[in-house]
Amino acid sequence: MGSLRGKGIAAATVFCLATALSAMAASLGAGQEAAFRVVDADGEPVVGAVLTLTPLDAQPDGPVDAPDGVPVLDQADTAFEPTVVLVRAGGTVRLRNSDPFNHHVYSFSRVKQFDAVMRADGAEKEIVLEEPGVVAVGCNIHDQMRGFIYVIAAPHYRETGAAGDAVFEDLAPGRYVLRPWHPLLRGRPARWEQEVTIDAEGGVKTVAIDLRAGRREGAGRGKERRKY
Ligand SMILES: [Cu+2]
């Protein structure tokens, strides 16, 4: 009986502690939500754009956005899937060939060069991406295959969804550099940088970018061709 009582008290103590901790976490991490919508020159939403946010003001060390596990750049149906894979600088991307035939994946990009013969039916190879920037990836066997590894140094990033929208949930208030990127972005990415202030105002900020002609030789994915 005594021991049951003891357990009851212990459980109550744990519950109180959990409540107190979550209240404390809520007050400490009183981050701001920041919502953006990326549109092209016609005002149409841009799907699959990447937004990064880099703080301009000194901030306490906080969590940074990162992929869940090792991101995979698959080769399936003679296409890279996804078209754009995101990784933190210093991180690893796993190439995988899910097709029943070989691919020969390569990059000549300044940020990272590699060359990998990918055998049919599940071959994998890990590539370490030390430097931030964009790595264009192709296949020596299938010229139409185009993919991108976007190596991110900024602590915060999001990819836009179907409405061109991206929401950062928990940002420290302050000034940031917002940098949008998309495989068809016109001009150098730095041209599209802007300073934004994250505060309690909320609302959706519109980010306008220009894209090169929607259909590019070899880009996209056959029947699912999108504005890449
Ligand atoms: Cu190939």
Image (cartoon, rainbow, N blue to C red):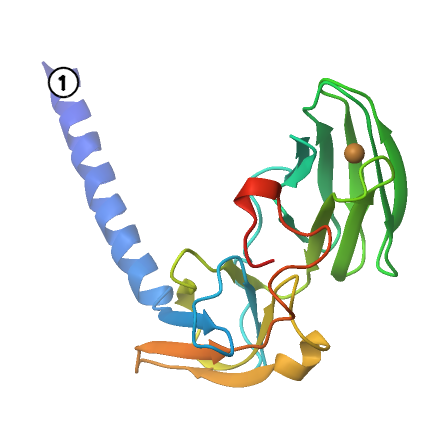
Which amino acid is tagged 1?
A: Leu
Q: Is residue 194 left or right of residue 43?
A: right
Residue 27, percent from left and from top: 30, 66
Residue at 73% from the left image edge and 55% from the top image edge: 217
Residue at 69% from the left image edge and 59% from the top image edge: 216
Label 1 CA crowd tier, 10 Å (few <14, some 14–19, many 20+): few
Residue 153, percent from left and from top: 68, 63
> Looking at the figure, which quarter contains the N terminus?
top left
Q: Is residue 195 left or right of residue 113?
A: left
Residue 196, percent from left and from top: 49, 84
Residue at 71% from the left image edge and 57% from the top image edge: 151
Residue 130, percent from left and from top: 81, 54
Q: Quadrant of residue 4?
A: top left
**In the picture shown, does residue 175 fall above or below 5?**
below
Q: Is residue 78 left or right of residue 47?
A: right
Q: Is residue 51 left or right of residue 97?
A: left
**In the picture shown, does residue 198 fall above or below 103?**
below
Quadrant location of ligand 1?
Answer: top right
> Camera-side residue: 145 or 209?
145
| Residue furthest top as drawn | 1
**In the picture shown, does residue 34 fall above or below 2?**
below
Q: Quadrant of residue 73?
A: top right
> Camera-side residue: 30 or 122?
122
> Camera-side residue: 169 or 147?
147
| Residue furthest left as drawn | 1
> Looking at the figure, which quarter contains the C terminus?
bottom right
Q: Is mark 1 within 8 Å of ligand 1?
A: no
**In the picture shown, does residue 51 fall above or below 13?**
below
Residue on which the image places disc 1: 4
